[in-house]
Image (spheres, rainbow, N blue to C red):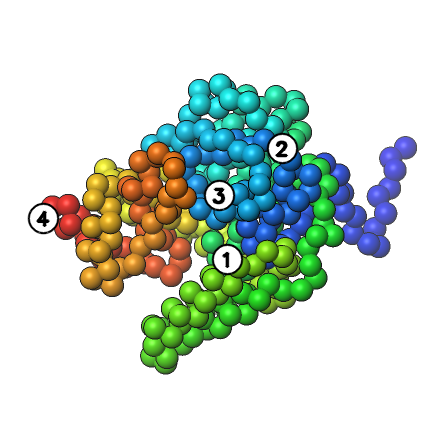
Amino acid sequence: MTTMIPIGGEIPFEHDERLHTYLTDSGRSSLRLILQSGFAGRRFLLPDFLCEVISRVFEAMGVRHAYYRTRPDLTIDVESVRHQDFDVLYVIDYFGARQHYHGLVNAEQWVIEDAVFLPVIEHPVDLTNWIGFNSYRKISPLADGSLVRSTAPLAGELIAKTEAPFSARKYEAKRMKAEYLREGRHTEEQYLALFAEAEQMADRQQAISSISGASLFNLLAFHRQLAQEYGIRARNFQFLHSWLGELGIGVKADYPCLYILDVDRRDELRRHLHAQRIFLPVHWPNPGGLHNRLYERVISIPVDSRYGEEDLRRVAAAVEAFYDR
């Protein structure tokens, strides 16, 4: 006899008990949460190409760490990992391209996956000891927010119920920039000063704060448009690749945010582009003592939905003109 499925009532939900989820105000707060949840006493292996914020957090907390090599194509140099002793392998999904690290850790070791450029944090089902986190302010209009997922419970009580002070300042700067672009109100100097002030506030902050209410609301809107946004970014990425493929690293991002160039005379190129009001980010200032050529060569072009082919054609033509002169 067939059992009849009940109709109506509450919608069931099957919780994945393998994963614990947290929301903080930023990627650096998520990293502090992880370290303060029993990991600060372990020995880490970090990539030798990384954002200086990571180094500052590790040094401020006195966490023991060594480095492995990141190859010119932004993948892990496997041999530089295998010959070292560590408890936690810290991997960076550079610009949204997930790293391949299977086989590099044993059953006792952990992987912390720094996925700041990815909107969704996916647990590798065959990895027991794993933590991943992102940073929404790197990949969306949100001024703050970071998602953490972990196979072990973290010290969620460390997350303050208050919002990070930098968030309101950054939203103010974003509003002023929007009004400047749309209506010509304010000046570039005004909103850039606010952005700089917000970053200084984030740098000084030691507390682990919650995601702001504004960002939590905006996060819902961001995910509602995610498929459409992905399509635009993928097209923009391919458009730039057709122009600048010889200079590109060729990162195959799960969620394209930037088209990454590996170029000679990077800083000279950046000045050339500044003169044409093209302001491209570089990655990253060398935190000191690390010998990876990528610090002097990488520059990136945003591919998000703010830009269309006309905008990207202007950027690509300016880059080509610099190297053709």
Q: Amino acid at mark 2?
A: Arg
| Dot label at residue 55 | 3
Q: Amino acid at mark 3?
A: Ser
Of the two numbered discs 2 and 1 on the same chain, state the one appearing first in sequence.
2
Measured in 3D between alpha carbons, the distance from the residue under mark 2 to the one under mark 3, in whole angstroms, is 15 Å
Q: Using the rendered image of the protein, determine whether residue 259 is visible from the camera's viewpoint.
A: no
The answer to which quarter of the image holds residue 294 is top left
Q: Nearer the viewer, residue 265 or 309?
A: 265
Q: Mark 4 or 1, which is nearer the eye?
A: 1
Q: Which residue is mark 1?
A: 203
Measured in 3D between alpha carbons, the distance from the residue under mark 4 to the one under mark 3, in whole angstroms, is 38 Å
Which structural element holds mark 4?
loop
Instruction: Identify the residue at image location x=31%, y=36%.
Output: 293
| Dot label at residue 42 | 2
Q: Mark 4 or 3, which is nearer the eye?
A: 3
Of the two numbered discs 4 and 1 on the same chain, state the one appearing first in sequence.
1
Instruction: Identify the residue at image location x=63%, y=42%.
Output: 35
Of the two numbered discs 2 and 3 on the same chain, state the one appearing first in sequence.
2
Which structural element holds mark 2?
loop
Q: Which residue is mark 4?
A: 325
Which structural element holds mark 3?
helix
The answer to which quarter of the image holds residue 296 is top left
Instruction: Give the mark count.
Output: 4
In the rendered view, does 173 fall on the left or right side of 166? Answer: left
Location of residue 86 with respect to 92 vertically, above or below: above
